[in-house]
Image (tube, helix red, strand yellow):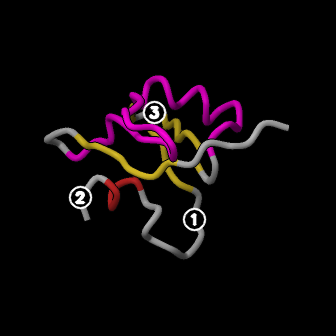
Amino acid sequence: MTKKRKIVDARADKDGDITHVRFDGNERYTSVDRAMPMADRGEIENTHVVRRSNAKPHLRTNPNGRDRDNLDRMAGDE
């Protein structure tokens, strides 16, 4: 079984949309477009892709009662 990647930081654009995430052990950020298929395959810890008919797909951390692993907070938007 492959070890799941852990997101430790995020970046947002001027509208507050998460655009990039950084995985534990990496210096560089990965685009959300590249991270979403990884989440779909179950390769990212505590994260899933939200797909709604009226909005573009986006990454979201699974609810767990903690906010320190919330992508918006990591990006400094909260």
Q: Which secondary structure lies at badge 1?
A: loop
Relative side of 37 to 20, left or right: right
Q: Which secondary structure lies at badge 2?
A: loop
Q: Which residue is mark 2?
A: 77
Q: Which residue is mark 3?
A: 57
Relative side of 15 to 64, left or right: left
Q: CA distance from mark 3 to mark 1?
A: 18 Å
Residue 43 placed where, x, y %? 67, 36
Q: CA distance from mark 3 to mark 2?
A: 19 Å
**Local crowd size for mark 3, using a 10 Å CA cut-off: few (<14), some (14–19), many (≥20):** some
Q: Which residues are magenta?
A: 16-44
> Could you tell me which residue is drawn at 55 percent across and 76 percent down?
65
Q: Which secondary structure lies at badge 3?
A: strand
Q: Which residue is mark 1?
A: 63
> Could you tell me which residue is drawn at 53 percent across and 54 percent down?
61
Q: Residue furthest right?
A: 1
Residue 42 placed where, x, y %? 70, 38
- Label 3 or label 1, whichever comes before in sequence order: 3
> Could you tell me which residue is drawn at 35 percent across and 46 percent down?
10
